[in-house]
């Protein structure tokens, strides 16, 4: 039995995706895992729905071919609704063995006011989590990679939303 047959990776389209995907690539190579890329379209009105779904598809269309080109089995999923709830639901429905996500590392006050995506997922699932703090990992991976050499993931898009599908 493979330890991590299927790894769920919630994406938010920010540079944090690259950081967590570098870890996922190594795990998927080691365990011959299927990688499930999830982007959650989170919207409050019909006006924003189309934009959010299109954005979600664009993120997946940018990341999935990079992983597939490296020989990984890749599945993409667009969820709709609350990112934490959808992540937990998809992990259960797809029988994922690991949820791998990046964290932006926002401070305590912001976490208290807005809530932490990672904390909400952690409390709502029994699936093991791999949390990669973006700043610390980016500092480490920058030393390991030449400029412009990305393991996998999205382009450098700014994003203030929580890492994982918001």
Image: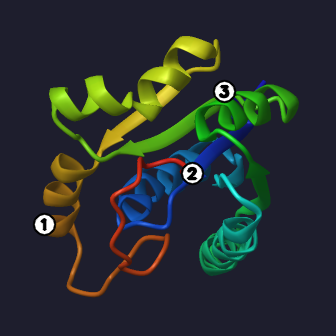
Residues 99 and 146: in front is 99
Q: Which x, y percent locates residue 69?
A: 67, 79
Marks 2/3: CA distance?
25 Å
The residue at the point 59 percent across, 33 percent down is 84
Direction from residue 64 to residue 165 in the image, left or right: left
Crowd band around label 1 with a 10 angstrom C-alpha radius: few (<14), some (14–19), many (20+)? few
Q: Mark 1 points at which residue?
A: 143
Residue extending furthest toward the right:
93
Q: Position of residue 133 (x, y in %)?
A: 27, 42
Q: Residue 102, percent across and down? A: 40, 46
Residue 120 in view, yes or no: yes
Of labels 1 and 2, earlier in sequence is 1
How many angstroms separate mark 3 from mark 1 (CA)?
29 Å
Q: Is residue 98 left or right of residue 141?
A: right
Is residue 145 depicted above or below 127 in this figure?
Answer: below
The residue to which callout 3 is attached is 3
The residue nearer to you, when weighing 43 against 54, is: 43
Secondary structure at badge 1 equals helix
Q: Which of marks 2 and 3 is nearer the N terminus?
A: 3
Residue 2 in the image, given as x and y percentages of width and height: 73, 30
**Alpha carbon of mark 1 to alpha carbon of mark 2: how far?**
27 Å
Residue 39 visible at all: no
Closer to the N terminus: mark 3 or mark 1?
A: 3
């Amino acid at each position: 039995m493979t330890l991590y047959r299927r790894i769920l990776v919630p994406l938010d389209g920010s540079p944090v995706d690259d950081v967590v995907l570098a870890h996922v690539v190594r795990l998927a190579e080691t365990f011959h895992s299927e990688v499930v890329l999830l982007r959650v379209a989170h919207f409050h009105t019909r006006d924003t729905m189309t934009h959010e779904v299109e954005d979600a598809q664009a993120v997946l269309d940018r990341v999935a071919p990079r992983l597939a080109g490296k020989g990984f089995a890749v599945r993409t999923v667009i969820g709709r609704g609350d990112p934490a709830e959808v992540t937990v639901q998809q992990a259960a429905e797809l029988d994922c063995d690991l949820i791998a996500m990046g964290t932006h590392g926002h401070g305590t006050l912001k976490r208290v006011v807005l809530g932490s995506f990672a904390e909400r997922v952690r409390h709502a699932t029994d699936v093991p989590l791999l949390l990669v703090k973006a700043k610390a990992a980016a500092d480490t991976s920058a030393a390991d990679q030449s400029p412009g050499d990305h393991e996998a993931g999205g382009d450098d898009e700014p994003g203030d939303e929580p890492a994982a599908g918001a």
